[in-house]
Image (tube, rainbow, N blue to C red):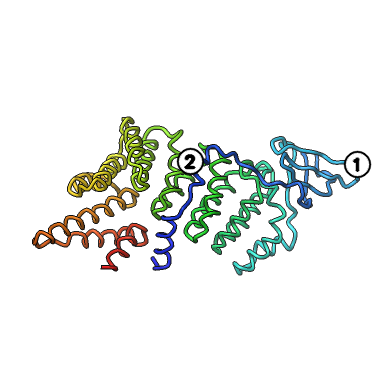
Amino acid sequence: MSVKLQLLIVLLAGTVGLQLTNADTQPYVAPDFSDLEPVRLEISQQNGPISARFVHPTSEGVEIEMIDGEGRIILNWGHMDQFTINAPMTKSLERALAHPVPAKRVQLLKAEIVPLLPMASVREGTTNLHELINAYIKAEMEMENWLSAYDISQQMALDLSPASTVQHFYKVAENLFVSGEREKALHLLDQLVAARPAEESREQTLSVAQRLLDLRLFEPSYSLFRAIAEDATGLLAKQVLLRCAYLRLELGDSGEAERYLSKAKAIAEDNEETLGGLQVVLGVQAFQKGDPSLCLKHLGIGLAYLLPDSNFKQIGLYFNYLSYEDIKVAETSNGSEPIDIPQNILDEMQLLFPDGAYTAALTTQTDTF
């Protein structure tokens, strides 16, 4: 991990805002399409094509202007079962999709696809629009144009667009955080949590929350985990509640952490992740109370349960290091010859989590000694 990224993560961890904490009370507001130019699309029914000139998106659906000038057809987004709406595969669009140079492909696709973005609300399976829009989003993401990908999200209705398209924006939000675009990342996550059904977005939201936790971005990670915890059940609920407890400890709210711990303990189901995670949270709790020996006792139990790729494995090793470091300092002050256990733990962290923010925090710390 570069020094620049390490510093960026530290700064973000200290300054990230609270927008997501009220995401459940803020309804999603879709873009206003009323002033947009209509687009030319191919529309057909079972008995053949419709003589349509232009299609104009609205907040409720589309207005189809007929070629013969005999008026318009108004269709609601949810009532297009009898129609197939496609973007014509022009030579310029085919050239854009097939261009071998990524930067040029993005440039060409932008000109072709941006006018179609409001049409993402058309029901999936009745159009080629989503295939084209997804190709453009992926092209921007491959170029790591996270701000451009964010702009795409603001030009379609996230609540009506299909999951196959919207899922890309969780990755966009994650990388906006990493690149320092904190406000836009929070805004997009606010929109996604408000716009998407909980059962549909849970997996994607959980992935982002885990990633933000790995980056030590505690506020937004907690907000996402809290949203998931509201309707999760069984083992998933227990895993999420334990993470909420840990994050509240990091955010200085021991009372709320205890509340989450109690809710997690009340769930009878367990697996290695929850057994280990509970001990890690208890260890962090003990460390914050100034008892590194009790912390090590809990962590010794917890780390034995956890898989190498677990968030809690990284957290447990981090506080293992800090606890032994505190004990090492105490032994040194008493004139004893301490064993350099902390360096062994750091070596393990650098092996398992070479790019992790917890590893970076300890590496930065040791570099200052």
Residue 225 has which mark? none
Q: Which residue is depicted at the point 27% across and 53% down?
A: 317
Question: What amino acid type is highlighted by mark number 1?
Answer: Glu
Label 2 residue SS: helix
Give the percent coordinates (x, y) of residue 125.
65, 43
Residue appearing at x 61%, y 53% in the figure: 134
x%, y% of residue 206? 45, 44
Q: Nearer the viewer, residue 194 or 64?
A: 194
Q: Nearer the viewer, residue 25 or 344?
A: 25
Indicate the position of residue 9 as horizontal and vertical percent values.
Answer: 42, 59
Residue at image mark 2: 202
Distance from the alpha carbon under mark 2 to that under mark 1: 47 Å
The image quarter in which residue 65 lies: top right
* Image height of 220 relative to 147, above or below: above
Q: Identify the residue at horizontal 84%, vertical 49% (top origin).
A: 53
Along the viewing direction, whichever of 352 and 217 lies nearer the viewer? 217
Location of residue 369 with respect to 130 vertically, above or below: below
Q: Secondary structure at mark 1?
A: loop
Return the mark for residue 70. Answer: 1
Structural crowding at the residue carrying mark 2, measured as other residues with C-alpha within 10 Å and reported as few (<14), some (14–19) or many (≥20) = many
Horizontal side, residue 199 vs residue 89: left or right = left
Left or right of residue 260, residue 209 in this image: right
Could you say where residue 351 lies in the image, as x and y percent from the top left? 29, 61
Q: State which quarter of the image contains the N terminus.
A: bottom left
Sequence-wise first label, 2 or 1: 1
In this rendering, is residue 23 above or below 4? above
Q: Is residue 3 above or below residue 125?
A: below
Residue at image coords 22%, 48%: 290
Quadrant holding the C terminus: bottom left
Q: Is residue 139 left or right of residue 43?
A: left
Please state which amino acid type lies under the numbered disc 2. Arg
- Labels 2, 1: front one: 2
